[in-house]
Amino acid sequence: MGKASAVPVEAFAKTRRRHDLHRPTRGIADRHCAVVGLRVPQTDGGRCRYFPAVQVDFGRLFGELFELERVVDDSGERMLFLVRDRVLKRQVGLRVHLRPDTPERAWFLREAEVLAQLDHPSIRHVYSAGLREHIAYRVGNWIEGESLADAVRRGPRPIPMVLSLARDLMYAADHAHVRGVVMRRVLPTTLMLDTSGRAVVTDLRFANRVLAEAQR
């Protein structure tokens, strides 16, 4: 399969709705499909095919550093990849922002900066961040588990688990506040519960610095 060419995000969104495409599954890492996009029906002899409206040429931009395992989330503005660090031999999360020259791009870069200044087990770590052409990215620890939203869908949580969750959040908030960061919003969809039951805040895009920190 030849390499697909990128198109504007606006055209991508319209095409995505028109073709009723599905998000990629674990098969995204198929060696025949070096370009990340959205899966279309497999009509090419069963081989993996993608619609040519591609947002991220993963192999060219990140292939030297990371081995792609799967696409975890695609909001149209951001994508989250589960990747394997080729040097450190470990799984990490690679979050990319797709839309340059937008207010959301500034929020994304600011969020990466804020996360990098915090070091707490209940706040996602950031190992590195940067720009690759029109793509902004950050690399953080991979959290194996589920979101609080997914956990709640299965029914009410036991009281001890709720108390543990509240404790983790309060300690995380205190850690951030001491360092001049106010966590304005934590959503069930962006709060992960890892396999040990610990709550981990993964999204600080709406965090604010206190005035003294902002003026430094």
Image (cartoon, helix red, strand yellow):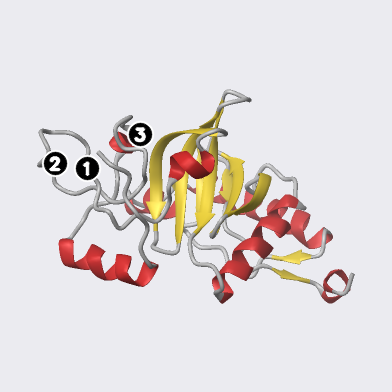
Figure disc tally: 3
Residue matched to label 3:
29
Q: Looking at the picture, which amino acid does disc 1 mark? A: Arg
User: In x, y percent, where is residue 146?
Assistant: 43, 44
Residue matched to label 2:
42
For this view, does 9 lie left or right of residue 206? Answer: left
For this view, does 4 lie left or right of residue 110? Answer: left
Q: Residue at the location (28% across, 51% down)? A: 38
Q: Looking at the picture, which amino acid does disc 2 mark? A: Gln
**CA–CA distance in space, label 2 to label 3:** 15 Å
The N terminus, quarter of image: top left
**CA–CA distance in space, label 1 to label 2:** 6 Å
Q: Looking at the picture, which amino acid does disc 3 mark? A: Ala
Instruction: Give the structural element (helix, strand or loop) at label 3.
Output: helix
* Residue 101 figure quarter: bottom right
Residue 49 shows which numbered tag?
Answer: 1
- Of badges 1 and 3, the one in the foreground is 1
* Residue 160 figure quarter: top right
Q: Residues within 10 Å of mark 3 (few under 14, many from 20)?
A: some
**Residue situated in front as seen by the camera: 184 or 101:** 101
User: In x, y percent, where is residue 2?
Assistant: 28, 42
Question: Dots 1 and 2: beta carbons under 8 Å?
Answer: yes
User: In x, y percent, where is residue 117?
Assistant: 77, 53
Instruction: Give the structural element (helix, strand or loop) at label 2.
Output: loop
Q: Residues within 10 Å of mark 2 (few under 14, many from 20)?
A: few
Is residue 100 among what the camera can see?
yes
Instruction: Give the structural element (helix, strand or loop) at label 1.
Output: loop
